[in-house]
Amino acid sequence: LVPAMSWAVSQSILVTYVGLMSVGLGMAFPYLLIGAFPRLIAFLPKPGMWMETFKQVMGFVLLGTVIYPMYVLSGVDPDIVVPTLLFLFSLWAAFWWIGRVPLTQPRARRMMAWGQAAAFGGLLGLVSFGWFYHPDDGFWRPYSGDVLAQHLEDKQTVLIDFTADW
């Protein structure tokens, strides 16, 4: 939608108006349809606790979208980014699981949730760093002008760490 709207606002006022109006009508269409045919309300899902769970699951989907841009934008050490984000995702899920058990529940139930969360987070941490992380022979290399020129020629991101020993 963003590329289409970006293109539309760079056009004439008529094209911009038609573009924005069509987006507005498209978003309003379900409400207009239900307003015109009230019997369609029967097809909508009934509210309940499932809505809270659905909201939280969609939150995890949103958190999951962090993984791809971080991987694309990581030019320093892409081998460590995905395992780290998978582990963070498992921690988010583990703490969400703990939060699903109210403090008013018996202690045994709360401890069971903590145990399940710890097992899940630990297992996924082992999996993410065991299966997805394969370090090479070392990240840092001694400086070499030839190697730098080769990486720049290959259009690779290069990070040069230099310090001063005063």
Image: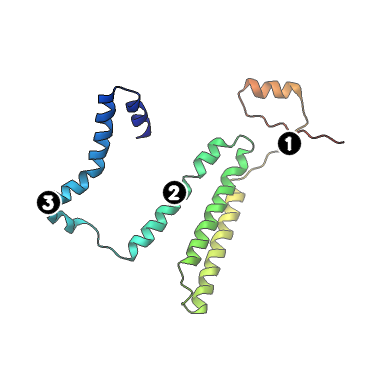
CA gap, disc 1 and disc 2: 34 Å
CA gap, disc 3 and disc 1: 66 Å
Q: Earlier in the sequence, mark 3 or mark 1?
A: 3
Q: Which residue is mark 2?
A: 62
**Number of marks drawn:** 3
Rendering colour mode: rainbow
* Image side of residue 32 versus residue 78, left or right: left
Estimate how packed mark 2 is, as few (under 14), some (14 to 19) or many (20 or more) residues with alpha carbons within 10 Å.
Answer: few
Q: Which residue is mark 3?
A: 37
**Amino acid bearing label 1:** Trp
The answer to whether residue 116 is above or below residue 60 is below
Q: Residue at x 28, y 33 (%)?
A: 20
| Label of residue 140 in the image | 1
Front one among 150 and 14: 14
At mark 1, the secondary structure is loop
Name the mark nearer the viewer: 1 or 2. 2
Locate residue 25, reporting x and y percent.
22, 39
Estimate how packed mark 3 is, as few (under 14), some (14 to 19) or many (20 or more) residues with alpha carbons within 10 Å.
Answer: few
CA gap, disc 2 and disc 3: 33 Å
